Amino acid sequence: MVWRGLIAAFGDRMNISKAVPPVTLFEGNTPLIPAPRLGASLGVDLFLKYEGLNPTGSFKDRGMTTAITQAAAEGAETVICASTGNTAASAAAYASRAGMQCVVLIPDGKIALGKLAGALAYGARVIAISGSFDDGLRMVREASDKAPIALVNSVNPARLEGQKTAAWEVTEQLGSVPDWLCLPVGNAGNISAYWLGFTESGGDRPRLLGAQAAGAAPIVLGHVVDQPETMATAIRIGNPARWKQAEAALQESNGNILAVTDEEIFAAYRRLATEEGVFCEPSSAAGVAGLIKRINEDRTAYEGRKIVCVLTGHGLKDPDSAVRGIPAPETIPADVDVLLKSIGM
Ligand code: F0G
């Protein structure tokens, strides 16, 4: 089958308008990559859903094809979102594609370079606020109430209609529903969307393992975090919009949510790249960090199980994190003998 994006593939199972042609960049259909080395060390059958291979480098494209198509059907000319970066880049790309204006609010100084570069390259109006993602979300909700602007954050139900397709892809690629699905949780749209997808399939459902950054773990703590802090800036969120829905999904799936420290996130991030050759952004490794932590505490629920970790964004989104703490490349003369000596041969 020639791949023409998520609406072409799954539109009949999406509750969105079909009045206009899909606004698409042929998103979705991302690989489910076995992770045998990491899996063996954890005693599980591990797979990575590599969402960084979507057109703008994150899973957000799944929900943006549907949100922007719906906005186009409703006649929107301008869309707006608050973002820790990936939603911004994705909204900007799909808005360009649809001939719409895009306005994005980002927390000043707290978004990764590749995401800012994307949003700017796609021609969005990028506005930095001296506040958090949560402040930005409050502002864009209010702005879209007061002015004719379509809100494309995941509070918009059309977003979940696209993002739920990842659950169906995982099931098809694995040949069954996984025992566990592990993923990072920020605004809690993605965990809600996966659960919607698995539930709509009507068959078996996985247990969900959500991971929040320790400095931004409102759902784990049970209260809003006023000043969320983590180096995993994509999930630096203190008051998730889909908090209640995520809690319901966690409960229905007999799942778990836990907090992982930045050290644990970065350790998992390095292991994915150096042991499996899969480079994701730091936040994306939070699900893997959570899995490692749970297995170290009590492996019985995981041993030998089929486990899928969702890697939500590409490693190149955040080049600063990739090089931080690693010595710069050494420079040598253009001489092969020096080269061999320097690599110990
Ligand atoms: N991973 C990455 C790479 C993200 O960018 C996000 C969210 C998440 C995980 C968490 O997903 O919010 O649905 O629970 N990024 C949003 C943004 C907030 O603005 O790009 P969630």
Image: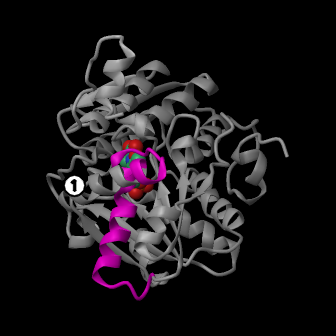
Q: Residue at x 66, y 71 (%)?
A: 200
**Circle 1 residue:** 262
Residue 19: x %, y % from top left? 76, 41
Instruction: Say which residue appears at 40% left-offset and 22% top-offset.
Output: 125
SS at mark 1 in the image:
helix
Name the magenta segment's main secondary structure. Answer: helix
Name the residue rendered at 32%, 58% in the picture: 240
Q: Is residue 117 left or right of residue 262?
A: right
Return the residue nearer the eye: 137 or 59: 59
Quarter of the image for residue 128 reads top left
The reply, left or right, for residue 302 in relation to residue 341 is right
Magenta span includes 181: no
Name the residue at the right extreme: 1
> Magenta region: which residues?
273-302
Which residue: 59% across, 47% down? 62
204 or 264: which is nearer to us? 264
Task: In this rendered view, identify the residue nearer to me: 278 or 63.
Answer: 278
Tag 1: amino acid: Asp
Residue 148 visible in the snapshot: no
Image location (x, y in percent) of residue 35: 52, 60
Circle 1 Cα neighbour tier, 10 Å, few/some/many (<14 / 14–19 / ≥20): many
In this view, the residue farthest toward the bottom is 300
- Check the image and report above or below for 343 versus 286: above
Q: Is residue 288 magenta?
A: yes
Whether residue 116 appears in this view of the structure is: yes
Residue 281 versus residue 217 in the image, above or below: above
